[in-house]
């Protein structure tokens, strides 16, 4: 019997993960089953379990791959380290432009799956933790909350701006607004839910930028 190489294993796992990703695009993540993945791959049940112990392990690799493709961190780091001197207001708008760019690009795929994971975390927190808990690296949302928002406060302080609310309230507002934009845009784009008006990322992030500037003591 020929020796199974690591390359063969990696290719098989990628094939299974790509199939699971395609299933997640057409179904809410919490409704995806192992049977769906088996049917999509055309492999036998044993063929799947040879490489993955359960569906959650497959979905974990799906999310890990998404983090490589859906990445605001590099663009944000480049912005924060840029030598050109931006005003606080320009910097906030550039941050929100980055968020809008990525959300527009991935609204129907990665962003949709991220939203589904949020719903899963609400309904089945233990299962969501099993899927996400072992993934290495920081998520884009985690970076926004832990790095980008504190950076905004530092920049506003440098310019001697006076915050118009407590930092924790502003931080929670920005995170909640981001999640709300994500949810409403996905509901209208992916699930055709009537929201009263068609929600699109860019104008909503532009309004968020103006709100952040005001709350951080700047002038729009």
Image (cartoon, grey):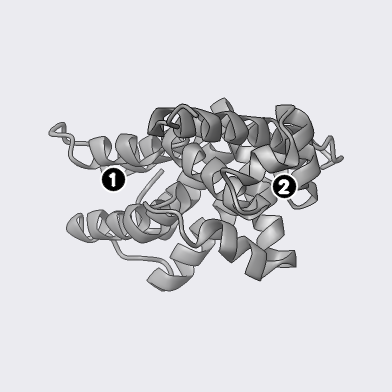
Residue to which mark 1 is pinned: 88
> Which quadrant is home to the C terminus?
top left
Residue 111 at x, y percent in the picture: 60, 39
The residue lying toward the viewer, choosing from 59 and 15, is 15
The residue lying toward the viewer, choosing from 212 and 63, is 63
**Distance from label 2 to label 1 (Cα)?**
39 Å
Residue to which mark 2 is pinned: 29
Residue at the front extreme, as displayed: 1
User: On the image, which quarter does residue 191 sit in?
Assistant: top right
Q: Is residue 204 visible?
A: yes
Q: Residue at x 69, y 42 (%)?
A: 46
Q: Residue at x 46, y 28 (%)?
A: 8
Q: Earlier in the sequence, mark 2 or mark 1?
A: 2
Q: Residue at x 65, y 56 (%)?
A: 118
The residue lying toward the viewer, choosing from 185 and 166, is 185
Is residue 140 shown above or below 122? above
Residue at disc 2, secondary structure: helix
Residue 184 at x, y percent in the picture: 71, 44
Residue at disc 1, secondary structure: helix
């Amino acid at each position: 019997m020929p020796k199974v190489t690591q390359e063969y294993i990696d290719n098989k796992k990628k094939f299974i993960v790509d199939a699971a990703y395609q299933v997640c695009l057409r179904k809410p993540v919490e409704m995806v089953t192992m049977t769906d993945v088996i049917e999509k791959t055309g492999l036998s049940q044993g063929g799947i379990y040879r490489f993955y112990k359960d569906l959650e392990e497959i979905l974990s690799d799906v999310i890990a791959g998404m983090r490589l493709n859906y990445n605001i961190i590099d663009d944000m780091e480049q912005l924060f380290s840029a030598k050109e001197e931006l005003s606080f207001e320009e910097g906030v708008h550039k941050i929100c432009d980055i968020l809008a760019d990525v959300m527009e690009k991935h609204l129907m795929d990665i962003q949709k799956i991220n939203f589904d994971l949020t719903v899963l975390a609400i309904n089945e927190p233990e299962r969501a933790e099993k899927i996400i808990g072992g993934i290495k690296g920081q998520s884009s949302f985690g970076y926004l909350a832990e790095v980008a928002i504190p950076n905004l406060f530092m920049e506003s302080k440098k310019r001697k701006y006076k915050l118009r609310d407590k930092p924790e309230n502003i931080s929670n507002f920005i995170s909640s607004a981001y999640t709300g934009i994500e949810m409403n845009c996905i509901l209208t784009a992916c699930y055709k839910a009537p929201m009263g008006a068609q929600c699109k990322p860019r104008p909503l992030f532009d309004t968020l930028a103006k709100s952040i500037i005001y709350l951080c003591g700047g002038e729009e």
